[in-house]
Amino acid sequence: MSGPAPVDVLILGGGLAGLTLALQLHDRCPGLAIRILERRRHPAPAAAYKVGESMVEIGAHYFADTLGLRAHLDAGQIRKFGFRFFFSDGCTALDCAPELGISRVFPTPTWQVERGTFENFLGREVECRGIEFLQGVTVRTVETGAPHTVHATHGGEPRVHRARWLVDASGRAGLLRRQLGLDEDNGHHVGAAWMRIDARLDVDRWCDNPAWRGLCDPPERWRSTNHLCGPGYWVWLIPLASGAHSIGIVADAAIHPVESFNSSERMLAWLKVHQPALARELGKQSNALLDFGFLRNVSHGCKQVFSHDRWALTGEAGLFLDPFYSPGSDFIAIANTYITELVARDSAGRMDARSVRHFQQLFFSFYRSTLALYRGQYPLFGDARVMTAKVLWDYAYYWGVLAPLAIGGWLADVALFADLSRELAQAQALNERMQDFFRAWHEAGPNRQASRWMDQQDLDWFARLNARLHDRLDDDAIRARLREHVGLLHALAGEVSAAARRTRPGLHADPLFEQAREGTRPALFDDLAGRPAAVATT
C-alpha cells in the first residue's frame, strides 16, 4: 500500500500536546520532517469540548516564552488573577465563606486559555512554519519498529505513514499506552463533570457587598481560577475569552460518586445542595448551556513514557494527575521538552539509552511528587484551616523546586541534578511527610473555622517566590537558589507543624519538622518566622 514519504517525527494527535511539541521540535531542529495526524478537522469551536483551560506558571512560561506565543495569549486569552479558594460548602453567599487568594495580581503571568481558540491558533502556526498537519485522519493500527508504521484512513482512503520517531499525543485515547499495555492505576480515584455556559459568571457581583469586592484590586475575582471547596470535592469556575464560562466538579469517587452529577440536570441538583450560591447563578442562565461532559476516572498513570526505540508519549496519552492546581499544561511542557531533547540528540548522533532512562526517571519523579498533593487528600478539601496551610505549602514546593528547574531551562541538565540529588531527595521526602501531616491534622478533629479573608500578598516570602521565577541564573546561582528554597521548605514545615499543634495539642510532632524549627532559617523566611498564625490562618 502506498503512502506519503517517511518523516523524522510522526505525531499522533493535533491537540494541545501534539501541536506544541511540533512547534518546539521545529524551533530546536528546523530541518526535521514533522507530520501531525489529527482526527478532527479545524477550526474547532471556540469553547471546545475539552477541559484544561487554567494555566499555571510552568505551562504559561512554556507557551509564552519557550514557544514565543505571548502576543496571542495577551491579545486572545484572559490574564488570570491567580488561584482563589472559597471553603463554601452549603454557603449561600461567598462573602461569608473563608477565602484564600491574592488581592493583586502576582508579577509572573498566567492565563485562562480557551482551548478551541488556542488550538485553532496553534494549528495555523504549525502550518505557517511548514509543518505537515493532516486533519480528518483516523489511525487504525500502529506498529512500533524501525521505522514505525501507522495505518490510517484519510476520508475513507487508506494510507500508511512511516517515521523514525513516533509520538503519541492522542489524549485519553492513549493509542500507544493501551497497545503496549502501559496503563497504570495510580491509586487516585476521582471523577469529574463539566459544562460550559454562554455567559460570564461574575462572582464579584454575587454579593451586594462593596467592601468585600474592594478587597481585590481590581475587583475582578471572576478572572481567577475560582475553587469552591467542600469535603471530598471542589468546583472550578474558569472564564473564557469568548465570554463563556467553564464550570466543573471534581470529586473523590468514594465520597461523591460521579453518578450523582453525571448530567447537566444532576449537576445542577448536586450544586443546589453543596454550592447553592453557584446553583442560584446558574439558574439564571438556564438557556445558556453550550456543552456537558463527564469522566469516571480522571487520573491515570503510565508505566513508561520515553523509549530508546524512538517512541514517546505526551499529554494525557501518557498520564494525568488531577485538575486541581492545573498541572496538565505543566506536564505537557515537561514531557515535550524531554522529547525534544531526545530527538535533537538523536539527530546529532548523541542519543543513548542512559539519557532516555535518566529523563524518564526525572519525569516520573516530578509526577510522583505532584501526585502526593492529591492522593488521599480530597477529604481535607472542606477544612479551611488545614487547606489554607496545605495550599501555601503546595505552592511553596512548586514555586520553590519544580518551577525554577522548568522555567530556567534546567530540566535536561544532568550535572545539576547530580549535584543537587541530596537536596532534591530531601525536598521530595519532606513533601510526602507534609502531605501525611495534613491528613493527620484534619483527622485529629474539627478545626475552628479560618478567618474570612486570607491574602497571600501578606506573606512576603510567598510573593517573593513568585516574583523571582523568571530570574536569570547561572550554574552557581541556580544551585544556591534551589538550596535556599529547600531550606525554606524545612523552615515552613516546622512553622506549619507548630501552628497545627497549637490548635490540636495532641497532634503528633514529626521529629523532622521539629529539627527544622531548631535549624537556621534562611533570610527568605525571616518575615514569617515571628507570626506563624499567618500559616494557621487564625
Image (spheres, helix red, strand yellow):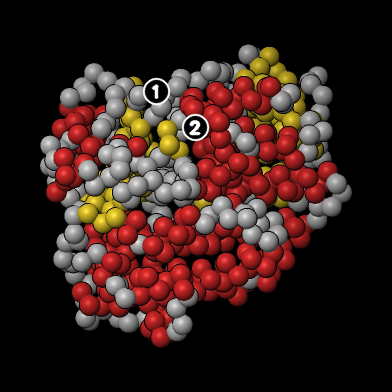
Amino acid type indicated by mark 2: Asp
Q: Name the residue at 46% across, 33% down.
A: 113
**Which of the labelled discs sits on residue 74, or is there none?**
2
The picture quadrant where one finds residue 378 is bottom left
Classify 426 as above or below 112.
Answer: below
Residue 280 x %, y % = 15, 32
Secondary structure state at the residue bearing disc 2: helix
- For the N terminus, the quadrant is top right
Question: Is 165 or 406 nearer to us in this picture?
Answer: 406
Q: Is residue 134 left or right of residue 323?
A: right
Secondary structure state at the residue bearing disc 1: loop
Q: Name the residue at 69% across, 64% down.
A: 475
- Crowding around mark 1 (Cα neighbors within 10 Å: few <14, some 14 to 19, many 20+) is some
Q: Is residue 401 visible?
A: yes
Q: Name the residue at 77% across, 57% down.
A: 353
Q: Nearer the viewer, mark 2 or mark 1?
A: 2
User: Which residue matches tag 1?
Assistant: 242
Amino acid type indicated by mark 1: Ser
The picture quadrant where one finds residue 290 is top left
The picture quadrant where one finds residue 247 is top left
